[in-house]
Amino acid sequence: MKVGDMAGTDAVFTKGWYRAHRLLLLRRISQFGILALFLLGPLFGIWIVKGNLASSLTLDTLPLTDPLLLLQVLLSGNVPAQAAIIGAAIVLLLYLLVGGRAYCAWVCPVNIITDAAAWLRRRLGLKAASEFSRQTRFWLLAAVLLLPLVTGALVWELVNPVTLTYRALLFGMSMAWVMLLAIFMLDLLVSANAWCGHLCPVGAFYSLIGRVSLLRISATRRADCDDCLDCFVVCPESRIIKPALKGAEQGLGPVIDSGLCNNCGRCIDVCAKNVFEFSTRFTNRLPLDRGSSNQREVVS
């Protein structure tokens, strides 16, 4: 396995720096671009989008609502506005197409912070001081949904790091910056991918949608894999790669069909052999392996 920040160096050599970072750059453009749209109004009076990532109105026409927020509103005993219901339906349909946890990689601003911590962790060669159970996020999701039922309030939205990031950029709230710094240090010093991969209830919620979503990453040319393990190093949910990459002998198809995949595409970027590509859930068939130029035995 590559150590430090060596993952992807072969891809840079064979494909060039841009192609080895293309999807990462697109993700950053998406994340910063979406954040900028929300800030243009309050900071410069250009109201393209009103609201925040939980609930917004684009061009005074298109409502978008976080389905998790809508569930909290319903469980708190409140009746959501019609626009909120329509907005949640639109968002739900979108993520059923592109992958539920695509929100985590392509929209969520906290992902920028956790990715920075993961990069620094690899650079410094730090080992995890402890490990959280990956099921913890689902227990926290249950708590997020239970609290409105018990209290009648949207408790999670008071501490949601995504919401706090927006407030911090607008109002300079010190508590928000403390929470974001805590997430960074948690991922850097305590456990790799602690927040996004083990704790975040929002990611847990969208992973449930991702189980049935259309867009997938596929190890289409998995027979060309040279076992460099770069994809495992950069993937925040690395255990979901093996069934698709090494499952041919077990009759498993090449599509990563886990809802935990956030479709970030880093495995596509860092693979010098171009094993991975975006595909759909309907291409999860073994004949895809026949397209490889290097038909060697795949070790399970």
Image: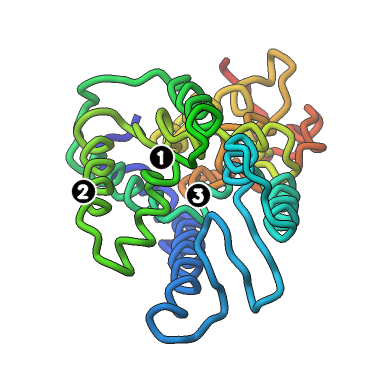
Percent x, y of residue 77: 62, 38
- Between marks 2 and 3 in the image, the one whose residue lies nearer the viewer: 2
Q: Tell me the residue that label 2 is attached to.
A: 178
**Which three-letter amino acid code belongs to the residue tagged 3?**
Ala
**Residue 241 in view of the camera:** no
Quadrant of the frame with the C terminus: top right
Mark-to-mark CA distance, 2 and 3 = 22 Å
In the image, 273 versus 42, the foreground residue is 42
**Which three-letter amino acid code belongs to the residue tagged 2?**
Val
Q: Tell me the residue that label 3 is attached to.
A: 105
Q: Tell me the residue that label 1 is attached to.
A: 234
Q: Looking at the image, how many numbered discs can be counted on the residues?
A: 3
Q: Is residue 164 above or below residue 135?
A: below
Marks 2 and 1, the one that precedes in the sequence = 2
Marks 3 and 1, the one that precedes in the sequence = 3
Q: Secondary structure at mark 2?
A: helix
Q: Secondary structure at mark 3?
A: helix
Q: Is residue 131 above or below residue 232?
A: above
Q: Secondary structure at mark 1?
A: helix
Mark-to-mark CA distance, 2 and 1 = 27 Å
